[in-house]
Amino acid sequence: MTQHLQPIVKSPLIADEIYLGRGVVIEKNVTISGLDGPMERLVLGDFCYIGENTKIICPEFRLGDYSKLHAGAFCHGYKPIRIGRNCWFGGNVVLDSVGGLDIDDNVGVGAQSQLWTHIQFGDIVEGCRFQSQKYMHVEKDVWFVGHCIVSPVKVGERSMAMVGAVVTADMESNHVYGGVPAKDLTDKLGPQFEDRSIDQKYEKLQKIIDAFCARHACHKDRFAIIRDISETKENVTCFNVVDRTYTRTYSEEEVMFFKKNVPLVKFTPVHANSFVFDEPEKKSFFEVR
């Protein structure tokens, strides 16, 4: 196995079950454990990254392929935190799972942002009314730009919150929000995603691949863009622009392409279901104790 596939772990991992994908990087001074002892299960997908001084304290933590959790993150709670593929978290984010937190594929959470699933502090014997826990599911392609504070609301696919937004109400799919409290600004700013034809996606991706190959002296025949799984080529990384999947080969060119282009280009492996909800396949991970 080539060097770029070997996990690099610079901090102790305290968990009963540990599944490390290929090329995982965990920097120094990272804390990973359960609330009162070992974490029950830790699952880190291929080529994901956890930055230094990050603290992860919960019963179960999952981070999908090519996702990055940058320095100073604080992830904590009584229930699992499950994060999908191609996600990006800026420095010093807070991910709370007292009520439970699932974050799907392709989500971006900018620096200093906080996602909360509970509220509690006031004395309940004295009659404080503000105490609650609520599950939150952040759907695919959501973007919290930065310095966002998010309550446990429904976060629709492709929705977006502008910098500094305080989100206290549900976010509709492909709508853009901003302000304190956040309001729907889609009529003013337009949606996060514009409609593109399959041909337009094909042309855009081809330009990205061409530029990548020219910059890194890669052979273009290591990549192909397809519209149907029947067009798949053996030992070639094939990007399907219809369903946003790719055929995984683990070639050096493929790994470098994703490392250089995620999060701006996001594909998930063909036939793979949501990383958030699937049980890990032991044959796909290195088991470490």
Image (cartoon, helix red, strand yellow):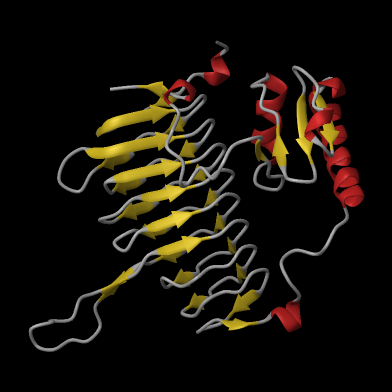
Task: Report which quarter residue 279 is drawn in.
Answer: top left
- Above or below, 22 against 26 in this view is above
Question: Is residue 12 among the parts visible in the rendering?
Answer: no
Q: At 63% across and 35% down in the image, what residue appears?
A: 271
Q: At 28% across and 56% down in the image, what residue appears?
A: 77
- Outermost residue, left direction? 125
Q: At 70% across and 39% down in the image, what residue appears?
A: 245
Question: Is residue 268 among the parts visible in the rendering?
Answer: yes
Residue 250 spot, x, y in % from top left: 64, 22
Q: Viewer-proximal residue, 253 or 271?
A: 271
Task: Report which quarter residue 188 is drawn in.
Answer: bottom right
- Above or below, 46 against 167 in this view is above
Q: Viewer-proximal residue, 270 or 286?
A: 270
Quarter of the picture containing the N terminus is: top right
Residue 219 spot, x, y in % from top left: 84, 20
Residue 104 horizontal side relative to residue 248, left or right: left
